[in-house]
Amino acid sequence: MIRPLPLAGAVLAALGSAALGAASLRGGDWPFSEHMAAHLLLSLAAAPLAVLAVPGWRPRPDGVLAVLLCAAVLLGLHQPHVMTRLMTPAGHALEAALYLLSALPLWLRAAQGGAGAAGALLLQMAVCAGLGAALTFSAGVYPARADDTALGGVLMWVVGGSVVMLAALATLISHLKTPEVPHEVTP
């Protein structure tokens, strides 16, 4: 059974990302912060909402592999020479697909709950916060204005990191509230 509200949210987040992505590709001044917001909408809104929309579909990805995939895409696409080459409509579409598809295993793992899911989210939060902080202080590295690059970094660092941290905390709290099944001890 598909849940219509999370599905509508996932579609709206993807459409919002596409609109921001198209706006960030307009000629002349390349707004890094809009580009960043588009990617955050995909990985932190569309992906988890898509997972919530289809509760019966629950592949069980490994948490470490999910984090490694998500981190590899995140770190790889933020290399200045890679980012510069992807500043085309086709490049942006490729980035969008990679962000969405790499985030799905992470959020599928999060949906399983438990301490492992919380740990995977906390690891991803550290990657997100670390890269966001690096972007914030990377004046002149990207082909965008330094202040706009810093704003994009803050979006990833603070907003992105906070979303993932809150999801990790909610997952951990849910895990801690779940009563343990007592184990029989045999002498």
Image: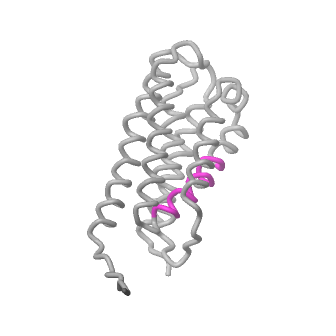
Please, which residue is most extreme toward the top here? 140
Which x, y percent locates residue 82? 70, 29
Determine whether 27 is above or below 76 in the image: above
Point 35% across, 82% down: residue: 183
Question: Residue 73's spot in the image, x, y percent?
Answer: 63, 42
Q: Quadrant of residue 24?
A: top right
Q: Main secondary structure of the magenta part?
A: helix
Residue 75 is inside the magenta segment: no
Q: Provide residue 26's location: percent of width, then percent of height.
A: 61, 28
Please name the residue shown 70% across and 44% down the image: 94
Marker count (numbered): 0
Q: Is residue 71 left or right of residue 115?
A: right
Q: Is residue 100 left or right of residue 154?
A: right
Q: Nearer the viewer, residue 68 or 186?
A: 186
Q: Quadrant of residue 179?
A: bottom left
The C terminus lies in which quarter of the figure? bottom left
Q: Residue at x 57, y 59 (%)?
A: 105
Of residues 47 and 110, the one nearer the viewer is 110
Q: Nearer the viewer, residue 98 or 27?
A: 98
Residue lying at the far front of the rendered structure: 187
**Which contiguous range is marked in magenta?**
97-110
Q: Position of residue 146 (x, y in %)?
A: 49, 15
Residue 28 position (above or below residue 8): above
The relative height of residue 87 versus residue 67 in the rendered view (above or below) is: above
Q: Is 115 left or right of 75, judged from the image as shown?
A: left
Q: Is residue 100 magenta?
A: yes
Q: Is residue 56 left or right of residue 6?
A: right
Q: Residue at x 44, y 72 (%)?
A: 4
